[in-house]
Image (cartoon, helix red, strand yellow):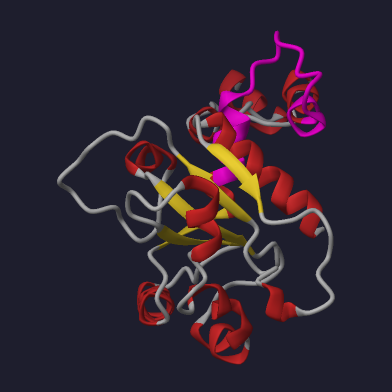
């Protein structure tokens, strides 16, 4: 599952024009070797803006992102509640001092460096959601991206009349879209329901 989750995140950033460098291809024998950092990403053409980036990033916000350390937590059946975050302090090892040295070696010392965590989901309730966000900020994170945002964006941008031979992931999404396994949420929301047989009979009577 980690490899699949990382592939999804890599394709997402590359789709938005980022250069993506993976920390390493092998599994380090010790967690002390910074293997919790999954990607270093660089936007070669960031759009300047006086507005700060929101903490929960949407796809439209990526154009203003310059450089980042990205950590992927593909715990797809979990919600990142404050309790889960408090019980798994190892999540935050990548924000400790010195973690940015590898990114500096990859992309140079210039420009701000954001620390981004890709999460399965944040709590739905406003209070619980804000509690989790406050805790993540307090640990030194700059932003999070929910997996739903990433997957929705990939599905939206894939075109069924293109052959994505260079990417198994994009090709699978294209095939699923071609057979209508993905539908526009707005279309489903406003879709007119078919009248039931009883309703037809009542209308005729």
Picture quadrant where residue 90 is located? bottom right
The picture places residue 144, in percent across and down from the top left corner, at: 46, 61
Front-lying residue, 160 or 2: 2
Q: Residue at point 57% right, 79% down?
A: 93
The picture places residue 18, in percent across and down from the top left corner, at: 51, 35
Front-lying residue, 102 or 183: 102
Q: Is residue 144 above or below residue 85?
A: above
Q: Is residue 9 left or right of residue 25?
A: left
Q: Residue furthest top?
A: 161
Image quadrant where one finds the C terminus: top right
Q: Is residue 44 above or below residue 113?
A: above
Q: Is residue 37 left or right of residue 136?
A: right
Image quadrant where one finds the N terminus: bottom right
Q: Is residue 109 left or right of residue 155?
A: left
Q: Residue at point 49% right, 74% down?
A: 98
Q: Say how many tags the image has.
A: 0
Residue 13 falls inside the magenta stretch: no
Front-lying residue, 129 or 201: 129
The span shown in magenta is: 150-172
């Amino acid at each position: 599952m980690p490899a699949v989750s990382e592939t999804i995140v890599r394709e997402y950033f590359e789709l938005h024009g980022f250069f993506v460098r993976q920390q390493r291809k092998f599994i380090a024998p010790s967690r002390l070797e910074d293997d919790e950092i999954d990607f270093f990403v660089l936007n070669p053409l960031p759009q300047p803006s006086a507005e700060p980036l929101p903490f929960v990033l949407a796809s439209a916000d990526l154009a203003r992102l310059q450089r980042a350390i990205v950590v992927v937590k593909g715990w797809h059946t979990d919600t990142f509640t404050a309790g889960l975050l408090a019980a798994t302090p190892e999540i935050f090892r990548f924000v400790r001092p010195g973690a940015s040295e590898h990114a500096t070696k990859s992309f140079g010392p210039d420009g701000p460096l954001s620390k981004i965590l890709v999460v399965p989901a944040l709590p739905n309730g406003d209070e619980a959601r804000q509690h989790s966000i406050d805790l993540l900020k307090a640990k030194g994170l700059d932003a999070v991206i929910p997996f739903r945002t990433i997957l929705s964006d990939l599905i939206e941008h894939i075109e069924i009349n293109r052959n994505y031979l260079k990417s198994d992931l994009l090709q699978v999404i294209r095939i699923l879209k071609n057979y209508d396994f993905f539908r526009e949420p707005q279309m489903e929301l406003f879709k007119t329901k078919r009248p039931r047989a009883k309703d037809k009979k009542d209308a005729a009577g």
